[in-house]
Image (cartoon, rainbow, N blue to C red):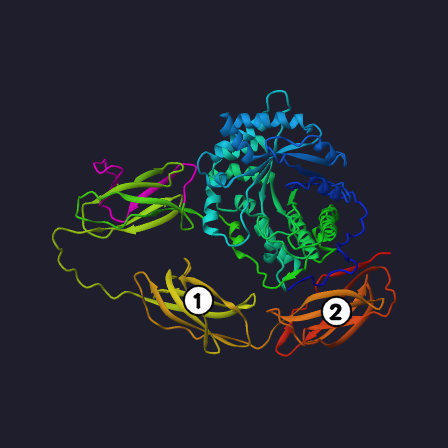
Amino acid sequence: MIRLLALGASCFAAGGVAALPARAQSSDCRPVEAVFYEQSDWARLANGLAANPSPCTSYYVTIPALAADKTQMRPAAAAQVRAHGSNFHALAEVNYTAWQRWVTSTGNSWYSAGVEARRRMASAGFDVAGGDRWVVNEFPSSVRAGSGTGRQDVRDLVRGLYEGDGTVTQAKGMVFVVGVGQSGLSFPQYKATLESWLQDQNFWADMSSYVSDFFQEVYGDVRNYAVPVQDAPTRATALNAYLQHLAALALAPGAPAAEAAAHNFLSASYGPLANASWAWGSAYGWTQVPADVMADYVSAQTYAMRLTGSARIGFAWNPLNSMGLSSGDFTAQVAAVLARLAGSIHETDQGDATQACAATGCAATVDGAALVPGWTTFSQWTPTTATFTSAPVTLTPGTPSPAISLQLQTGGVNTTLPVPSTVTITSTSRTSAFATDPAGPWQPALTLTVQPFTGAASFYMQDTAGGTPTLTANLGGALTTQVETIVAPTPAPAPAPPPPPPAAHVASLTLTPQQGRIHVGLQVVGAAGEPLQARVVLTVLHDGATIATASGPTDPTGTLGVTARPRLALGCYTARITALSAQGHLWDTSVPPAGYCVRALPAHVTTVAFGRKQGRLRVAVRATDDNGRALRARVQFALVRGSSKVASTVGQADSAGWLALVARAKPPLPGCYRVVVTRVVAPHSRWDGISPLRRYCIRR
């Protein structure tokens, strides 16, 4: 089932979504570039945006190349866009695939393709001095992956577009980068690809020189947005994790120095190309939902993008009648979605991102919808390691080894880098030596260089004494190890038995609630109380039943923390340590007693819904537990207009958790209304004391 929840009255009309009344303009104008891509619907898009324009916004509407030959610009179209006002500009589509065919068939260079595209752009009436620009649609996946000549091709193309043939003004333009789906993606592989791309200093230097705006296609899926129970801020956070993932990774901590060029360029030029294309089953994400749900999705994307404070937002606009609507009905509903697109931009021009949700609530739901948590990993840089890929060797003393191979990996994924990578090889044995050739020369530590775009290197070792030396490959502080075996020709006399290892001891074990889940903390120490780095295996139990098992290493302070995934439930929690190992130590198997009992669970007021009943203002609140389930709680709340109480009620919520009241005034007075909850009581529950910040405004 697909539905909208808790939406403001009068926001919906037959055939679609009605726009909110235009807000009075303020001097607090937050400028933004709004960039739009479409395949053919540019005139309707420009007209719809111009019907509700924001004076704070510079609108850029893509004019698609001619369908018969996409190296040819559409004549006289740019002027129609500019006619809507000084803040409306046309983008001349430079279709990558079409110009690739042109390069192949003519034998000309990619630079020449850019120069020729600028000439055709000028002939078709695009006015760079008037604010029109070129846009490459779209950088292919080979650019991101670094395969073939893809990156060099587009570097030459944008340089030609910037410079032209000398008869046109040098001008930077925009690029659209081919996107990836919001779900079903191999995040480690994709992230490794991006991290490598972001270190291509020459590529990003050219982008900085010739490109003003760098847009990533992020055509999302409504089913990864319209998640029941999730509020608008939570949805916006999840949306931005996807919409902003390329910029987030470029600006994430822990990046190597080679990433500085990408960091500097993308921090000043990145924009997401979000999804306003209704109603697609593929290609443009998945948007086969009713028009009012699509309008809510558009509002939420604008809300999310505006929350970042970025000077760039973008949308793909390509309506598709995939749900069997009549021509008139489809046209009317497309117009309604377009009106919401224009409205959400205009309503946020004073910097209040929440205004984008005023018309719809940003609360549509789709049964089975779920967030995609993998996008949150792009807020941190994953170190690249030089990993041993050849098997451990067994040698006799003084004998050179076969080649020992290393492979660059990011997050366990084989990768190449566009810059040289310096790897230092060392051994725990003082008698080990290394060389890049089996004939030497040999040295106790070796510095290897992994050449750009190769990802692999090899070396040789030898050792004059028997033993099991551990080799370490150090790439910028990221370490990998491998143990080799050196077999002495004659057995050494049996050593005296070693003394028993010192004891490892669990000094503390605690169970505490954290963010609605049980958290287990422990510390491992040695016999003298010194912290130990150990590997611990533990089980978490609820009323004697196992709910989670985990294993992991303690940190340098000897501490390990584990949070069980299941939400807190009534009853008592305990933890059991089943294994503990620390190098050079033996666990004494003792564990301090620890437990935690839950007598009450959090209660929340999650939803406030306004509406009309028989001409009077009706408001309802919903109480739920920490898992979003309805509570038959006793609730007391008041309806407040400004600072004046309009009405109040106290009573038992129904089986769905709802309690409602209807104000006496008919019709209700103009103004903004809100709800103040003062009490929520339910068995085995404790209210968090928070009233949702939901307003309902009546203007006459």
The dominant secondary structure in magenta is loop
The answer to which of 296 and 375 lies nearer the viewer is 296
Q: Is residue 112 visible?
A: yes
Q: What stretch is highlighted in magenta?
A: 415-443
Residue 157 figure quarter = top right
Residue 617 figure quarter = bottom right
Mark 1: secondary structure: strand
- Look at the picture and state if 667 lies above or below 88: below
Q: Name the residue under label 1.
A: 522
Left or right of 530 in this view: 349? right
- Rendered location of residue 331, percent (x, y): 73, 49
- Rendered location of residue 114, percent (x, y): 57, 28
Left or right of 480 in this view: 435? left
- Rendered location of residue 198, percent (x, y): 49, 40
Mark 2: secondary structure: strand
Give me the residue at 72% from left, 52% from top.
Answer: 333
Q: Is residue 81 magenta?
A: no
- Rendered location of residue 544, percent (x, y): 46, 78
Q: Can residue 170 be seen in this view?
A: no
Type of the residue with mark 2: Ala
Give me the residue at 59% from left, 31% from top.
Answer: 71
Q: Name the residue under label 2.
A: 620
Give me the residue at 11% from left, 53% from top.
Answer: 490
Nearer mark to the viewer, of 2 and 1? 2
The answer to which of 441 and 238 lies nearer the viewer is 238
**Marks 2 and 1, Cα distance to the nearest angstrom?**
45 Å
Quadrant location of the C terminus? Answer: bottom right
Quadrant location of the N terminus? Answer: bottom right
- Look at the picture and state if 566 lies above or below 320: below
Crowd around label 2: few <14 · some 14–19 · many ≥20 (10 Å): many
- Look at the picture and state if 651 lies above or below 211: below
